[in-house]
Image: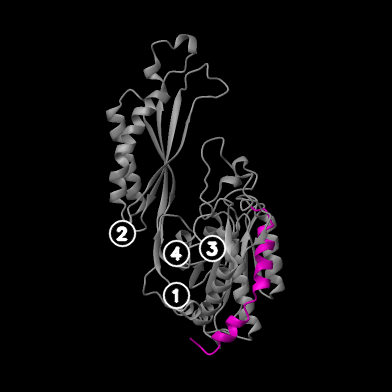
Amino acid sequence: MSGHANAVTACVDEARLVETACSLVAVSSPTGSEQGMAERMREVFEQMGLDVAWQEVEEGRPNVLGTWDGLGGGKTLMFNGHMDTSYSGREPWLRDKPGFRPDPFVRDGRIYGLGISNMKGALACYVEAVRALQDAGVRLRGDVMIAAVVGEIEKTQWGEDYRGKDYRGYAAGSRYLPTHGGAADMCILGEPTEQRIVLGHYGAMWCRVSTSGPFVHTAFSKGRLPENSIVRMREVMDAVMEWIPTWEKEAAYRGLDGVVNVGAVSGGYPWRVSRTPHRTDLFLDVRVPPTMPMAQARRAFKDLGRELAGRFPDYGIETEVYVTAPGAEISEEHPLIAAIDESHAHVFGAPPERDTVRWFSDASALTRYGIETVNYGTSSGLPGAEGENLDIKGLVDIAKVYALAAASVCEVA
């Protein structure tokens, strides 16, 4: 570790970091409504003296890219974080959970509020890391980028009822980013990893299985209950449940089995249950290891569909794959891993642990544009009963690691 390390870490300002993080949480930014958050990030970047690029991914949904130019001759490191939040804060089932509202507060050394964990806390850490380098008088050879992007949350359009920008997630912003100037050698994604280096994460394939049946009035349905598409789905779901363990073994990766979630069921009309439903849909989230091509995963699901159609020939079986978001991995030998290891050890006293996760991140898109990406950030595990919250000390320590890693990757001039 260079002689600048202690000077840099001493310049990480806890009060400033907390103020930044709270100001970001205070801006409501569910998927599809990131404009206000982008304006706040632009303001912060301009205050830092960064070069700012405004990328209009679609109307009202801009990426904001702040670049601290180096003196030349070094690598470019990107810090990437999504601005959209998993929820809006208006959901009835979250009404009594303060950590799921865009109203930040500090209590017992923790920041509470919607998005602090996923992942406005990371954006604040990136900002503080660059500020610490600037305050320490350090100049780097390479450039440092902070990319605040739209549309990362695992959401997608489907059917007639779920269309528009509110449903365009799954790396919408990070796919746009590298094709419009956001080109870097490597990237740190501060997703909440509990201070572990994530060497690989699963991708997602979202699928539909449907049954059909007659559309008739209740008065004329006597004796036809077995033809009801919902009733038929009961048998089909049992068959799908038989398939899931086989898939999960086939999708094993780095000591983890795959996983399949039964995410939704839709059939009939609650406002008109005097009619039998003509179709019932079952929706699955099938997690796919980064080592498996999505085409292979899709074939496996379509094979399941053909098997179901043969087993239930009168049920009108249909299948559809409507999300294919690949996973991502990074080599243990990548220089970015070494830089984080050394920086983490300087701050925490020992190198970070490794992890493999089944959640999705924007590393999926970035790596496919040649930007090798690692997920590494602070977290205290899943949100508690009160919702999202993060330990302030953890944020401060991770900001220190980010600053030191940037100095290592981009080289002190």
Numbered badge on residue 255 = 2
Give the camera-side residue of 398 and 350.
350
First reached walking from the N terminus: tag 3 or tag 2 = 3
Circle 3: element type = helix
Q: Where is residue 9 shown, x and y percent of the image?
A: 58, 81
How far from the left and from the top, in percent, is residue 308? 31, 32
Kind of element beneath mark 4? helix
Q: Which residues are magenta?
A: 1-29
Q: Residues within 10 Å of mark 4 (few under 14, many from 20)?
A: some
Query: Of the residues tagged 2 and 1, which is closer to the observer?
Result: 2
Please report whichever mark, 2 or 1, sits nearer to the chain's N-terminal start. 2
**In the depicted view, which residue is nearer to us: 374 or 193?**
193
**Which residue is at 62% across, 42% downward?**
91
Q: Is residue 343 above or below residue 413?
A: above
**Do tag 2 and tag 4 residues touch (Cβ < 8 Å)?**
no
**How would you classify the magenta stretch by its main secondary structure?**
helix
